[in-house]
Image (cartoon, rainbow, N blue to C red):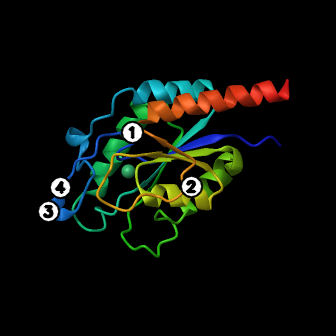
Amino acid sequence: MIKKQAVFLDRDGVINKCIFDEKINSNSPRNLNEFRILPKVKDALIYLKEMNFLLIVVTNQPDVSRGIILKSDVEKIHEYMQKNLPINDIYVCYDSNDNNPYRKPNNMMIIDAAKKWEIDLSNSYLVGDRKKDIDAGIKSGCKTFFIDYNYKEDKPKDPNYVVKSLFEATEVIRKLKNENKQFKN
Ligand SMILES: [Mg+2]
């Protein structure tokens, strides 16, 4: 059986704009009205689809368990994403407990997706804007892209690539794929 390649995508800061609220230490849009897809994200996802990648969103949404955001509002955002973007699946961890194996930097969301979709993790990628994302990707054996917004927090130590956007990550992935093809010929 030939396993598939995937790009695992963090949500806030990768697909959509973060909405920072320092008072409650949150960076997620609270509802569909606050949800804005970042420039060129749709193009990037279409290119990745054309390259035959599965596109899997893996997102921590701890504000739900903290009582700041309604689960039903997160679900509405994800329905909207599924309708408007070429995404195959969305995995969410609503828990704020770092011991939860599904909450990044733990990687059970990725492991579950890999089983369901028959994904070859060592030939897959993860794109994220925080250390937690990159660490989950490294743990899973994926190559990692860190979108660096210079947040005032620890940066991941060893992402494979540092980029400015999902679109830039997509261009690197396209180059890597082309180089691989040349090797095989
Ligand atoms: Mg993020």
Determine contact: label 3, label 4, CB under 8 Å.
yes
Dot 3: few (<14), some (14–19), or many (≥20) neighbours within 10 Å?
few
Q: What residue is shown with label 4?
A: 21
Determine contact: label 1, label 4, CB under 8 Å.
no
Counting residues from the start of the chain, the first of labels 1 and 2 encountered is 1
Determine contact: label 2, label 3, CB under 8 Å.
no
Left-right relation of 170 to 179 = left
Q: What residue is shown with label 3?
A: 23
Query: Looking at the image, which is closer to me, 144 or 26?
Result: 144
Q: Position of residue 12 (x, y in %)?
A: 35, 47
Query: Tag 2: residue type?
Result: Gly
The quarter holding residue 98 reads bottom left
Q: Which residue occupies 42% across, 27% down?
A: 42
Q: What residue is shown with label 2?
A: 137
Counting residues from the start of the chain, the first of labels 2 and 4 encountered is 4
Element marked by disc 3: helix
Left-right relation of 161 to 32 = right
Question: Mark 1, mark 2: which one is toward the viewer?
Answer: 2
Q: What residue is shown with label 1?
A: 15
Q: Position of residue 90 (x, y in %)?
A: 48, 47
Query: Tag 3: residue type?
Result: Lys
Element marked by disc 1: loop
Counting residues from the start of the chain, the first of labels 1 and 3 encountered is 1
Q: Position of residue 120 (x, y in %)?
A: 71, 47
Counting residues from the start of the chain, the first of labels 1 and 4 encountered is 1
Residue sticking out furthest to the left: 23
Left-right relation of 152 to 117 = left
